[in-house]
Amino acid sequence: MNVTKNSVAYTMKRNTKKPGSTDKQDQKPNAKQDEPKAPTKPDDKKQLQDRLVEKVKSLVKTDGTTEYAECENCGNYIYAVNGKDGKTISVSDFCAMGLKRFGKAVCKNCFAELNEKKNAAK
């Protein structure tokens, strides 16, 4: 049998579907897919806070009595630091500050560098 692009056999072969396959044109649009996502609700803030706490817990490690984490920017260690007011900022609090501000846990040097870049961009 001679099959050319214009022959009936060619058209029939192209239009046959494999068992279990679906044609996107035959499907009805899903109403949930067409709806835009709802803006974040105030309840989502608690979920974000919970995720932040879990992330910080996974980053902070303890070696004896010393807490530390690894900077996600340069790879150096993050230790407790003294804040501007002289109070000590714990490793977990410093990691949380970096995650909130930059989206990653950073050491004090990277924090200062990224903070400077962020302020310069404003």
Image (spheres, helix red, strand yellow):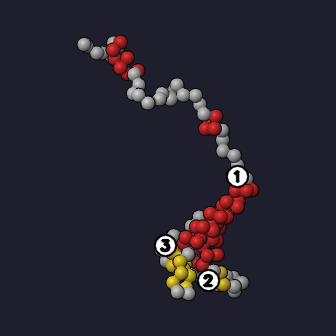
Amino acid type, residue under disc 1 in the picture:
Thr
Tell me whether the residue at label 1 lies in contact with that at label 2, contact meaning CB atoms closer than 8 angstroms: no
Which image quadrant is residue 56 in? bottom right
Distance between mark 1 and mark 2 Cα atoms: 34 Å
Residue type (three-letter) at the residue carrying disc 3: Cys
Task: Farthest residue to the left: give it.
Answer: 1
In the displayed structure, 117 sits above or below 26; it is below
User: Of the residues tagged 1 and 2, which is closer to the observer?
Assistant: 1
Give the Cα distance between marks 1 and 3.
32 Å
**From the viewer's perspective, is the residue at label 1 or at label 3 nearer?**
1
- Image quarter in which the C terminus is found: bottom right
At a point 63% along the width and 66% down the height, the residue shown is 52
The residue identified by callout 3 is: 74
* Residue drawn at point x = 58 percent, y = 28 percent: 28
Instruction: Say which amino acid is labelled 2.
Output: Val
Mark pair 3, 2: CA separation? 17 Å
Q: Which residue is mark 2?
A: 81
Q: Is residue 56 left or right of residue 23?
A: right
* Residue placed under numbered mark 1 in the picture: 40
